[in-house]
Image: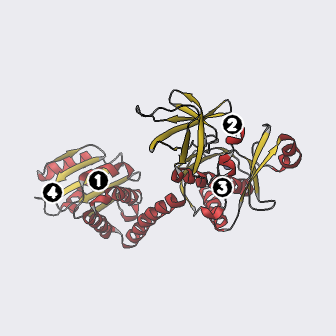
Amino acid sequence: MNQESATAIYWSSPYQQEINAKITKIKGSEVQFSQTFFYPGGGGQLHDKGRILYLDTEFPIVEVYKKDEEIWHKIKKNKEIQFEVGIEVLLKLDWERRYEFMKAHTSQHLLTHILMKKYDCKTLKANFEEGKVEIEIDKKLNLSDIFDAIEEENNTLNQDAEIISIIVDQETYSKRYKSITRGKTSDEDTVRLIQLGKDEGFDLVCCGGIHVRNLSEIKGIVFDSYKGNMIKYFVDKHAINFANEQRLLMNNLEEITEKKGKKLLEMVTNKIRNNETLVQGNVKLLKMIFENIKTWSEEINDKHVTILELDEIDRQIIQSSAKELEKDSFLGLLGSNSILYLLSSLESLPANEVVSKLSSKTGAKGGGNKSFAQISVKDIENPFSVLKEIIKEI
Ligand SMILES: [Zn+2]
């Protein structure tokens, strides 16, 4: 089999995971085979990885690339076993990784199609990681438009839509397909087209990447972020994991918003106490609280001030989340250790100034900077009312 037809195995048999091949060329630690299904990368999709099995020993294939129409495989060799041209080996694909790329890549075809159809919005660039996609679009959309597009994608994924690979020569392409292809056209001698849906399908593009056979293999996508015309989203099991995590945080926030005030911190502290491994999640949760802190605030001299009592909370967690405090807010947190933590994003009410006034008024010890300060209030009878008095004075 020549190299030309060898390169097409990942197109014709994208689900093949093992294949026998002979070594045809060796260059240092790089090898060519009589046939290969390893994708050399391209179109935003990374190259495959896998292994060679030879003399009962496995050699990892760490990189695959295409140069001058030839596919090279970089192999992690060992000193005992030498490769020679002509020997037969078994090639094994790192299937899990490849399949995630296939799903991510195919999901992007569909989203790009939907964005074009709904908003006449082109995709300029796409990058894929395992379970994660980012695409750059050519215009600014509303977040709600993107949510709508993602919802439409998820509805479409549920349908039983086949993905068809069409390989034609340039002449056939120009005559029959060029005018109905979305996106970039091709001037290659052999053109590979990908059609979503049977018969005439609903989307047709030129693409040399690897795709799943049916859209229903992708269990769904979940929005991650939209910044500077870049949309990021998760795919399949990564989407499900991400969604579950978000749902948990959102549920907590919803509950918190209902109960408000004191209850809110009780919940956070209980969470921290009950599961220390969830510290990262709690930082996120605290950030969400901080971003919504005005919901629970009262106004003192036109300043939004929130004062809450909490049981156990780690100073480092509060401090690391403090950056996320909503603008023009002031937060006082009293812990069961009788330490009053003050967080401020108010220029007119620096946390350290409040602490130094508290200190000179009561003799308590404390310190900090203008955004985060703390003071021991174990000898102050009613620290909250003293704090409010001081805020009124500043
Ligand atoms: Zn593609």
Q: Position of residue 111 (x, y in %)?
A: 66, 55
**Tag 4 residue:** 377
Q: Position of residue 265 (x, y in %)?
A: 30, 65
The picture quadrant where one finds residue 145 is bottom right
Under circle 3, the secondary element is helix
- Viewer can see residue 312: yes
Q: Earlier in the sequence, mark 1 or mark 2?
A: 2
The disc placed on residue 104 is: none
Q: CA distance from mark 4 to mark 1?
A: 20 Å
Q: Earlier in the sequence, mark 2 or mark 3?
A: 2
Q: Earlier in the sequence, mark 4 or mark 1?
A: 1
Q: Are marks 3 and 1 in contact (CB under 8 Å)?
A: no
Q: Looking at the image, which is closer to me, 387 or 190? A: 190
Q: Earlier in the sequence, mark 4 or mark 3?
A: 3
Q: CA distance from mark 1 to mark 2?
A: 57 Å
Q: Earlier in the sequence, mark 2 or mark 4?
A: 2
The disc placed on residue 3 is: 2
Q: Nearer the viewer, mark 4 or mark 3?
A: 3
Relative horizontal placement of residue 183, taking residue 336 as reference (left or right):
right
